[in-house]
Image (cartoon, grey):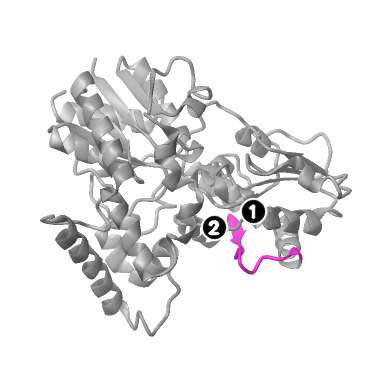
Amino acid sequence: MSRVLFFINPFYGHINPNMPIIRDLIKMGEEIIFYTTHHFREHLPENVPVKLYPSKDLFKWGIEEQVTEINTGLQKILLYYERDFGPIYQTLYKFAKGELEVHRPDYIVYDYFDASWAKRAAEDLNLLHISSSPTYAICKEAFLKNPEEFVRYVWRIPMDRSVFKDEKTIKTFALTIEKCICRKYRLKSFSLFENGNSKYLNLIHTSKEIQPYSTLFNDSFRFIGYEHYREITPIKHPSKKKKIYISLGSTVRSKDIDFFMICVKSLKYSTAHIVMSIGPYLEKSEFDHMELKNFTIINFANQVEELSKADLFITHAGHNSVNDALLLGVPMICIPIQTDQFIVSKQISENGAGITLSRAELNEELLWKAVNQIFNQDSYKSSSIKLGQTLKRKGKYNKGALEIIKFKERNGI
């Protein structure tokens, strides 16, 4: 039996993919300690041993308003990467290092996104570490393959030709950021593209078919697919009435009242029944003045259960939400808002499993047309089913858990 500490960011889209891995590692006899906040302790299975992070406020960089400006402008890109050296990261680094010194794990699993503090703590103590990415992977080779795509969909900078004249300019800009960080913080090296990656093992919760440029990643990257923690199958409707599920997730982005109003005004005369999850920041009373006979408006939903009954999912294209839909063969209208959602929605559209709409250009007519396009073309449904098949595990145990056991064997644990 080995002891493993999981340092995963406290958001549903990050926690959910790791639950099947933890479930099977416990079955295999591993001793687990999982770090989260009080809110998520209440949502985790009772058999998952949990310790709390010192404060939920340490993770506001992931859900609060200051994130809204990170993806605009060149200076903001530098500020984004400099978070690794800011006070919040330093607090988390010291916390992680203290926990590692107390519990002496055989290895750790850390969140690829914004948990480099845990990786650094493990490196400082010469501990083996595994990265767990809830979305697609990033490496330097993938950036070099298509720098313009990286700028547009990852950094979210408009392709201003006065700034980025060609691919060479983009590469020079990336190198300049790396040099600035090294000089400012007296580092020997820093990589914009490898900072979250582990040199030992990287578990990517998607399939090679969905991962952009999957052939460019080395053997330390294992594309393990995705699994619902509890098995749920699609529910056949007792009637022919279509069902639509709408959600922007549970982060601060979900308080986009204008988005939900567009959905309501566009679809209030639809013959479909619509379940709209508005998240924790809005009140259902916002919609009381509207007569919405075909809408059920709620703050929280069991997303997998709702999708098991749905014919269409209108989503922000968070990777966790997209995987939930694909496993149940539900086509999507993707309306990405930030970071990885733009790449994820692009992959869904290119694979024919849905349609991508711009949030900035979204209006009632565009949404109505997209809904009817998906309902009138069976190919979206069949493509979603086909893509979902690439995510499913085969065999008794979760692929991620099996990869960890192989990792232990290679390293003599």
Quadrant (top left/top right/bottom left/bottom right) for the C terminus: top left
Q: Is residue 125 above or below residue 217?
A: above
Residue at the (51%, 28%) spot, across then down: 39
> Is residue 276 part of the magenta span, yes or no?
no
- Disc 2 vs disc 1: Cβ atoms closer than 8 Å? yes
Q: Residue furthest front?
A: 87
| Residue 293 shows in the view | yes
Label whose residue precedes the other's in the sequence (2 or 1): 1
Q: Residues within 10 Å of mark 2 (few under 14, many from 20)?
A: some
Which residue was labeled with disc 2? 337
Residue at the (60%, 44%) spot, across then down: 329
Q: Is residue 412 above or below residue 180?
A: above
| Residue 406 shows in the view | no
Q: Nearer the viewer, mark 2 or mark 1?
A: 1
Element under label 2? Answer: loop
Quadrant (top left/top right/bottom left/bottom right) for the N terminus: top left
Left or right of residue 395: residue 411: left
Residue at the (83%, 43%) spot, across then down: 240
**Which amino acid, by three-letter code, is at mark 1?**
Asp
Which residue was labeled with disc 1? 256
**Which amino acid, by three-letter code, is at mark 2?**
Ile
Please state the extent of the stretch shown in magenta in the rendering: 353-364
Q: Residues within 10 Å of mark 1 (few under 14, many from 20)?
A: some
Q: What x and y, as percent, mark residue 117?
A: 26, 41
